[in-house]
């Protein structure tokens, strides 16, 4: 699915990622954990194609194609989805309009016809129920006046409708109370499938109580300093990040 | 975006699609302006004597005036002697009686513009008056409108057939002394639309005028007069396009609306005059005076405009709220790209008691364009309990354009409530990236964000025109991303 090799990324002259290696197979869930400033958000941005970053070395291939060479909208149409840490507001553009435009651009990319209006509504309403959202959300402007939890749920709703293959969740748990976290996690879990992979970027272990990862990687100073199974997250919760950072510094 | 990226790209690549020129045999005056030209103009149009007097009076007054300089626009002085003041497709002596008599080239031009004049092909429910350079070439659905008692005809025809209405109302809202361009228009206007809706009649269809400048070196000076008698109701739309030419062309129109007691006039404009090329060469100077008089109690006038064209736009559709409880509304989207300049807004003059006005202005600036909102809310002492709400939003696309807001508020009545809200925002990179990350191209994303920004205005437009306006915005933003 995704193969990252020796990836080095800078912002301006400042190196942020210093040689990331990561292999993600279809159906796997990988959690990327790490302290603030370790490069977690940079990793999710560079994979989804945000501008402002320079790749100085290494590669990332997605389904055998050079991911870093694709425009962001092409990545999206090819099935890469970023659930944003801070979803933006788009005044005057209804949620349902954005969803339909996005779905159609993806369908078009795959040589499919535009979705029928009735089929689309049936699809969307089904997903709205799944995420325990009010249908009124569909007709409100994208994220405008939404609470933090509503915005995050809206991201998952978009994910559910666009059915991507590689989902990158950037700090999805931040700003969520426990009820919202449960709902969002249930939404994500319902989307798990053998051909869909997830990269969950998070600071805290608590998200992993609800979405069980297959692998946990710890990012510090732009490198993956430790990888393991779900138990690694628990260890981090207990000991914090400093023991790994220290270990790396002394190594 | 229901239109796919490919379609958008196709649209973008064809630039200004109304920029074609129709080759025609025309009757065109030599450039120049003096009293003889005006007499000749009045004669060729077979006008009654009082019109010639009206025109000459206006011309003499115009000669004493100076071109206004207060607007936030820049252009070289216009040489009024280098413009031709009359150009019309050649036709049979008495003018065309039916479509068969109109030059097929003219019909073809309108067809190309998506305005077929053949009633069979027209959208049902919209009557069209087509003005080509200086003359009205066709008015559709005249018969059906006549059955309802509605008069909808070229103003040059109304001058001959309904002189009593013209005498009473022409210049009653915009007097010849009003401003430089209004005075010039009064002197040399060639055609335009005339509408009279009798008492209690709800006009059975949308009325629309489509203005087309075709000939080179001509000015278009049209005059529109709409009178809605007591309790009547009318919705009117105007559309405008012109060929691409390297020299600037002048369009100085005057629109007067009169709403009597309980009457409602809804006036919508989709203006897409040629804006000049990417380097600011050519384009229409659109210097227009539009004003409505809400003369009767409980009358209502609503202006909705979508302005995407013209090199320079200078226009302030206004409402004089004379009647008690009368209502004035102004909804505007003005988009400028490349080197376009727009100084546009409205004036709401509250005279009657309990008069209310609403102003919603959305300015979008891209490229190196300058976009100015200029508005006046004036509440006279007589206007007890007058209320105004103004909302001015500006959206910037890129970092080389400008948005300016000049609100003027004069209140002489202590019970008045006047509210003004203004915002300026930029399409953020985060918004763009978010949309792209969902699969939209940058162009589609900008178009969607801009359309969202304009939503409050678009919902005021008649349905089929709202669709046209949205498409137009997408086109006019060509090349503004990246």
Image (cartoon, rainbow, N blue to C red):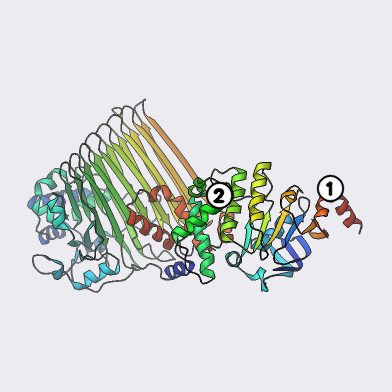
From where the camera sits, is residue B401 visible? no
Of badges 1 and 2, the one in the foreground is: 2
Location of residue A90 in the rendering, given as x and y in whole percent from the top left corner: 52, 51
Instruction: Return the residue at label 1.
Output: A240
The numbered mark 2 sits on a residue in which chain? A
Residue placed most toward the observer, B348 or A187: A187
Left or right of B430: which side holds B26? left
Left or right of B115: which side holds B361? right
Left or right of B390: which side holds B130? left
From where the camera sits, is residue A49 visible? yes
Instruction: Return the residue at label 2.
Output: A129
Question: Residue B185, relative to residue A57: is it above or below?
Answer: above
Q: Secondary structure at mark 2?
A: helix
Location of residue B167 in the rendering, given as x and y in whole percent from the top left corner: 12, 45
Left or right of B29: which side holds A55? right
Residue at image point 64% right, 62% down = A48
**How far is disc 1 from disc 2 in space, using C-alphas?**
38 Å
Q: Which mark is residue B275?
A: none
The numbered mark 1 sits on a residue in which chain? A
Residue placed most toward the observer, A205 or B404: A205
Location of residue A191 in the rendering, given as x and y in whole percent from the top left corner: 64, 58
Location of residue B357 (image quadrant): top left
Location of residue B294 (image quadrant): top left
Residue placed most toward the observer, B216 or A63: A63
Q: Secondary structure at mark 1?
A: loop
Location of residue A205 in the rendering, given as x and y in whole percent from the top left corner: 77, 49
Discs 1 and 2 lie in a common subunit: yes
In the picture, the quarter occupied by the N terminus of chain A is bottom right
Residue at image point 82% right, 50% down = A234
């Amino acid at each position: 699915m995704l193969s990252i090799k020796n990836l080095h990324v800078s912002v301006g002259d400042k190196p942020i990622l210093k040689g990331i290696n990561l292999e993600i197979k279809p159906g796997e869930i990988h959690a990327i954990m790490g302290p603030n400033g370790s490069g977690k958000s940079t990793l999710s941005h560079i994979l989804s194609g945000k501008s402002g970053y320079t790749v100085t070395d290494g590669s990332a291939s997605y389904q055998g194609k050079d991911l870093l060479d694709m425009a962001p909208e092409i990545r999206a149409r090819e099935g890469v989805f970023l659930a944003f840490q801070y979803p933006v507001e788009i005044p005057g553009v209804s949620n349902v309009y954005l969803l339909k435009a996005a779905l159609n651009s993806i369908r078009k990319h795959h040589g499919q016809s535009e979705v029928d209006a009735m089929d689309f509504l049936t699809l969307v309403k089904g997903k709205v129920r799944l995420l325990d959202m009010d249908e009124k959300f569909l007709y409100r402007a994208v994220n405008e006046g939404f609470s933090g939890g509503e915005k995050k749920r809206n991201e998952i709703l978009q994910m559910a409708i666009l059915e991507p293959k590689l989902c990158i969740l950037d700090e999805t748990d931040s700003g969520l109370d426990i009820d919202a976290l449960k709902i969002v996690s249930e939404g994500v879990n319902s989307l798990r499938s053998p051909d869909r992979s997830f990269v969950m970027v998070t600071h805290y272990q608590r998200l992993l109580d609800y979405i069980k990862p297959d692998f946990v990687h710890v990012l510090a100073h732009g490198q993956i300093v430790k990888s393991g199974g779900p138990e690694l997250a628990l260890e981090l919760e207990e000991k914090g990040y400093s023991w790994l950072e220290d270990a790396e510094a002394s190594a | 975006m229901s239109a796919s990226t490919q379609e958008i790209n196709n649209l973008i690549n064809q630039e200004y699609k109304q920029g074609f020129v129709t080759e025609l045999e025309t009757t065109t005056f030599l450039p120049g302006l003096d009293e003889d030209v005006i007499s000749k103009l009045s004669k060729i149009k077979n006008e009654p004597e009082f019109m010639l007097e009206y025109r000459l009076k206006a011309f003499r007054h115009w000669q004493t005036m100076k071109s206004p300089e207060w607007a936030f626009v820049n252009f070289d002085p216009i040489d009024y002697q280098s413009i031709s003041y009359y150009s019309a497709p050649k036709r049979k002596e008495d003018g065309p009686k039916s479509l068969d008599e109109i030059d097929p080239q003219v019909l073809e031009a309108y067809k190309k513009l998506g305005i077929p004049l053949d009633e069979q092909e027209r959208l049902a429910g919209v009557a069209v008056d087509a003005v080509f350079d200086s003359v009205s070439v066709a008015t559709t659905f005249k018969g059906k409108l006549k059955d309802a008692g509605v008069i909808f005809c070229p103003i040059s025809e109304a001058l001959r057939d309904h002189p009593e209405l013209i005498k009473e109302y022409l210049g009653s809202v915009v007097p010849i002394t009003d401003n430089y361009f209004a005075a010039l228009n009064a002197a040399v206007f060639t055609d335009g639309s005339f509408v009279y809706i009798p008492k209690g009649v709800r006009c059975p269809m949308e009325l629309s005028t489509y203005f087309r400048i075709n000939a080179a070196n001509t000015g278009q000076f049209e005059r529109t007069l709409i009178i809605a008698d007591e309790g009547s109701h009318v919705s009117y739309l105007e559309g405008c396009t012109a060929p691409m030419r390297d020299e600037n062309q002048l369009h100085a129109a005057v629109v007067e609306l009169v709403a009597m007691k309980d009457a409602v006039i809804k006036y919508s404009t989709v203006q897409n005059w040629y804006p000049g090329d990417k380097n600011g060469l050519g384009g229409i100077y659109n210097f227009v005076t539009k004003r409505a008089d809400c003369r009767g109690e409980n009358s209502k006038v609503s202006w909705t405009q979508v302005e995407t064209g013209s090199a320079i736009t200078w226009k302030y559709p206004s409402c004089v709220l004379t009647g008690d409880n009368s209502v004035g509304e102004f909804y505007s989207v003005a988009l400028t790209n490349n080197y376009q300049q727009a100084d546009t807004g409205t004036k709401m003059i509250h005279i009657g008691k309990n008069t209310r006005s609403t102003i919603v202005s959305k300015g979008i600036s891209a490229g190196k364009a300058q976009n100015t909102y200029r508005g006046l809310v004036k509440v006279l002492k007589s206007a007890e309990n007058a209320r105004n709400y103004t909302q001015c939003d500006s959206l910037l696309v890129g970092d080389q354009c400008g948005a300016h807001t000049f609100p003027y508020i004069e209140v002489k009545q202590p019970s008045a409530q006047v509210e003004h809200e203004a915002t300026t925002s930029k399409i953020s990179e985060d918004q763009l990236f978010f949309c792209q990350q969902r699969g939209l191209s940058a162009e589609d994303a900008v178009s969607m964000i801009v359309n969202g920004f304009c939503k409050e205005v678009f919902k005021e437009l008649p349905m089929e025109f709202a669709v046209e306006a949205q498409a137009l915005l997408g086109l006019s933003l060509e090349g503004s991303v990246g």
